[in-house]
Amino acid sequence: MAATMHAFASGAELAAGLADRVAEALSAAITARGSASIAVSGGSTPKAFFQALSSRSLAWDKVTITLVDERFVPPDNPRSNHLLVKANLLKDKAAAARFVPLYQPAEDAAKSAVIVTQQTRGIDDPFDVAIVGMGGDGHTASFFPGGNNLKLALDPATPRGVITMEAEGAGEPRLTFTFSSLQDARLLVLHIEGEGKKEVLAKAEQAGDELEMPIRAILRRAASPVQIYWAP
Ligand SMILES: O=C(O)[C@H](O)[C@@H](O)[C@H](O)[C@H](O)COP(=O)(O)O
């Protein structure tokens, strides 16, 4: 599926433009179906976007927010994506939204994944909005090169839901929605910033194995046209 590039002069302009587009998509979903769902990514890139989106006026009480992926750490851990979303998105007008975390207390990540797959059943079928990022190694979500469950994660036959991922570049064990959960979002966005990420994207757009640069699965096989939002 072809991707569409939306380039902005600055991160602040991108944050405002993406917040407008996402607010429009969530409102359209609420009008059409009475509710809306969005899966957002963690990391350092989305902070300004989260803050812009939190101020947008829409029926937030009809919106379910969850994460594309999460580190297997409790929400008070500085590495937690839940903590990032709580501090930057679940405030202002967006505080009225329902948030479904991916981290669930359990003796291990695998047991947590089973619990959260049950708790998120239906909201990813399909997501109204999914926002993915990309690392310098071409990972997206927690689809890391060399990941122990990478083939399972990218397999279109893998059922929707949350699985675990362990990889050298991932730090803690990860909890991640599968490719099948993300690829048909009604609005599928790849949000990246900086010249370095633009170069990584250009390499990902060339021929090569998805397992080497997992973002290639999204760029090549997503059912939804990928909207790339980029600023220097
Ligand atoms: O949990 C995470 O870290 C994210 O979900 C991950 O997939 C992120 O989008 C990329 O690693 C980019 O991270 P930066 O925005 O920090 O470059």
Image (cartoon, helix red, strand yellow):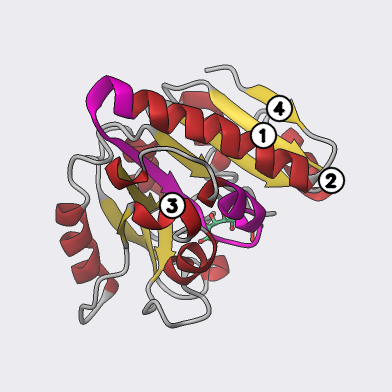
Q: Amino acid at mark 1?
A: Gly
Which residue was labeled with disc 4? Answer: 6
- Relative height, residue 222 to residue 73 (above, below): above
Q: CA distance from mark 3 to mark 4?
A: 25 Å
**Are there few (<14), some (14-19), or many (20+) residues within 10 Å of tag 4?**
some
Badge nearest the viewer, 2 or 3:
3
Which one is nearer the viewer's eye here, 149 or 141?
141
Q: Amino acid at mark 3?
A: Ala
Tell me where the magenta segment starts and ends, as one range.
Answer: 30-52
Q: Secondary structure at mark 1?
A: helix
Q: CA distance from mark 4 to mark 2?
A: 14 Å
Q: Quadrant of the C terminus?
A: top right
Q: Is residue 43 magenta?
A: yes
Which tag, 1 or 4, sits closer to the chain's start?
4
Q: Residue 167, how many percent across, how many down?
A: 48, 66
Which one is nearer the viewer's eye here, 59 or 171?
59
Which residue was labeled with disc 2? Answer: 195
State if disc 4 and disc 3 touch (CB < 8 Å): no
Answer with left or right where residue 212 lies relative to residue 221: right
Of the four image quadrants, the one with ligand 1 is: bottom right
Q: Secondary structure at mark 4?
A: strand
- Relative height, residue 84 to residue 209 (above, below): below
Q: Is residue 146 magenta?
A: no
- Relative height, residue 84 to residue 53 (above, below): below
Q: CA distance from mark 2 to mark 1?
A: 19 Å
User: Which of the numbered marks, if any, corresponds to residue 17?
Assistant: 1
Which tag, 3 or 4, sits closer to the chain's start?
4
Q: Secondary structure at mark 2?
A: helix
Which residue was labeled with disc 3? Answer: 94
